[in-house]
Image (cartoon, helix red, strand yellow):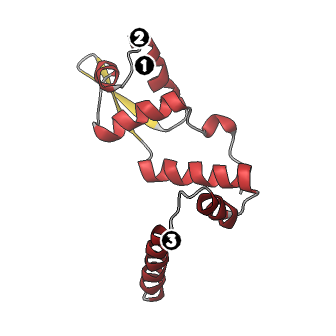
Amino acid sequence: MAPRKQSDRLTPLETEVMNVLWEISPATVQTVRQRLERELAYTTVQTMLNVLVRKKKARRTLKDHSYYYRPMVSRGQVARSAVKDLIDRLFGGSAESLVMSLVESRHLTPEKLARLHRMLKAKEARDGND
C-alpha cells in the first residue's frame, strides 16, 4: 500500500470542523461556525470546509443559494487512519509498542487491559463463525 500523504491527514482545525459535520449534517458554513468551540471568521470556516472537500473528506451541494456540507468519511475511518499513522510514525509500525507505551504511562490499567482481552476474545469468536 502506498504511504499516505501528509496532506491526507486532518489538522486539528479540520478535525474540529469534521466533528461538527459528524454531529449535524448537512450543515452550512454559518451552522458549522456557530457550533465550533472557538470563534472563527466566516471566511476561515468556509476555507476549512473547502479544504475538506478538496481532500475528499467532505462534500458540498448547492441548495437555495447556500452550500451544504456533509462528511464523506466516518469518524471511525478517520480515527483508524490517525491511529495507523501514529503507530507507523512513532512506533515503527508496531501496535504492540503503542499498547506497551499506554501501559507504561498508566493510560491502560489492568482492568482496562482485561476488558480489551475480553473484547478481543469476543471478536475472535465472531470472526470464527463467518
Local SS, label 1? helix
Q: Are marks 2 and 1 in contact (CB under 8 Å)?
A: yes
Residue occupying image coordinates x 23% and y 19%: 64
Mark 2 or 3, nearer chain start: 2
- Do labels 2 and 3 touch, CB within 8 Å? no
Left or right: residue 23 compared with residue 15: left
91 sits left or right of 53 in the view: right
| Count of picture labels | 3
Q: Of 59 and 81, which appears nearest the observer?
A: 81
User: Horizontal and vertical percent for residue 95?
Assistant: 65, 64
Q: CA distance from mark 2 to mark 1?
A: 7 Å
Query: Residue placed at 30% from the left, 18% from the top?
Result: 30
Q: Quick one: label 2, few (<14), some, or many (20+) residues within 10 Å? A: few
Q: Residues within 10 Å of mark 3 (few under 14, many from 20)?
A: few
The disc placed on residue 41 is 2
Residue 42 vs 13, above or below: the answer is above
Residue 24's disc is none
* Camera-nearest label, 2 or 3: 3
Q: Quarter holding the N terminus?
A: bottom right
Q: Which residue is mark 1?
A: 45
Mark linked to residue 110: 3
Residue 117 higher or lower than 63, as above or below: below
Query: Mark 1: which amino acid?
Result: Val
Q: Is residue 97 left or right of residue 23?
A: right
Describe the element under mark 3 as helix, strand or loop.
helix
> Callout 3, which amino acid?
Pro
Determine if residue 70 is in view. Answer: no
In the rendered image, which quarter contains the C terminus?
A: bottom left
**Direction right: furthest residue:** 92
Residue 46 position, x and y percent, is 42, 18
Does label 3 or label 1 sit earlier along the sequence? 1
Name the front one of labels 3 and 1.
3
